[in-house]
Image (cartoon, helix red, strand yellow):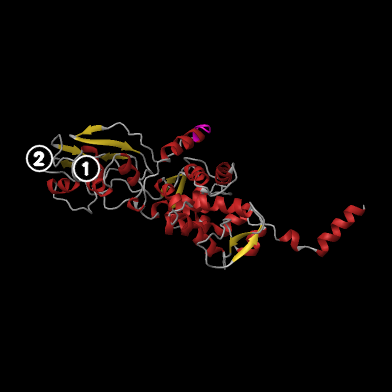
Amino acid sequence: MKKAFLFIVSLYFFPSAFSQKISAEQYIKTYKDNAIREMKRMGVPAAITLAQGLLETENGNSDLLKKSNNHFGIKCKSSWTAEGVSHDDDAIGECFRTYKDAEGSYRDHSNYLRGNDRYAFLFKLDPRDYKGWAYGLKRAGYATNLRYPEILIKNIEENNLQQYTMVAVNEVPVFDASKYQSDPEEKAFNEIVKSKGSSNNQQVNIVSNTSKEKIDINGSKAIYETKGRSLLAIATENNINLNKLLEYNDLQKDGLLEDDQFIFLEKKSKEGDKDFYIVQNNESLYDVAQKNGIRLQNLYEYNNLKGDENIFAGSKLNLKPTSKDQPVLVKEIPVITPVKTYAVQPKEGLYAISKKYGVTVAQLKEWNNLTDDNLKVGQQLIVSK
């Protein structure tokens, strides 16, 4: 009875000791936009940033956070000229950086990783490769905890943090490969990450020196690459200048592949290996050019087309300048779909989908009669009316 009485009294006199505790869900909701913004600015995956924040701040409840606004446990070091705070960590009374607010901490975290040579290799990874990033941070010396990668991965998977990476994945800054030297330990690191990833029967997509099987399409060498692969990584793996790779594939800028497709490793031919081609469902002029190993500009010329024209299924396109047949172009969509649908991808949530299509989570729930936020991979959602 006495213990119960003392506990009730403590609740009455010291309510702040219990009311200030926040959950992982609350932390994520509060700071997810900071992580997304920093990913777009500097390229650190939002899922990794949030996972580190959860770990380093004990879900937003650590003493260090409360007295310094330091979300990532970054110590002062010799390069830090602003204010610091004393905190016991690996040693007693270590100096940790202090920030005016959370935004300052998130910005400094991105700057710290992006501007430090020992983390340079991480920016060669696919930003969706959270396992590669988790093991890479440990390898580069970010933390002394031997379980640091596993904890980050657990935070990401249990809280579906990958959805926030997906929001910004197409707006990641282009990595400047010329700024950094190759890391001689990178190959060994890749093998470690692959072995870790295989234990969970999940593939880890990271840069490696393993070349894919090259095939011949209309006299030019090509490889088949999957959606999400970095063009810089493909160029590096095949010892091709990035600008040359973009030129060979009629691409204007670096980034991640939006679809599975053939990537050419040398110039495509000016003419096709047959006279004409019939456009299939959902194929663009670019798709036709890649599929037939012909330069896009030549495809335009042979069919009197401009780059911004849409060609639909059933169109007959010339692949050679000497073809006697005139192109037959279908320019009307035979079927008009009243609503637009989308198939849910792995690790994707309503928030990420709403951002992708410029709608609200509430609208998605209303249009699809959803009572909660739980989604299944492959589930068809109405995303526009």
The residue that disc 2 covers is: 325
Kindly identify the amino acid type of the residue bearing the numbered disc 2.
Asp
Q: CA distance from mark 2 to mark 1?
A: 19 Å
Tell me where the magenta segment starts and ends, as one range: 197-201
Camera-nearest residue between 221 and 192: 192
Q: Position of residue 100 (x, y in %)?
A: 57, 68
Lower sequence index among marks 2 and 1: 1
Q: Position of residue 139 (x, y in %)?
A: 50, 44
- Quadrant housing residue 216: top left
| Residue at the spot 51% in from the left edge and 42% down from the top edge | 135
Figure disc tally: 2
- Residue 117 appears in the picture as rendered: yes
Kindly identify the amino acid type of the residue bearing the numbered disc 1.
Ala
Which numbered tag is attached to residue 289? 1
Q: Is residue 2 left or right of residue 23?
A: right
Q: Is residue 320 left or right of residue 38?
A: left
What kind of secondary structure does the magenta stretch mostly adopt? loop
Rendered position, 377 above or below 107: above
- Quadrant housing residue 224: top left
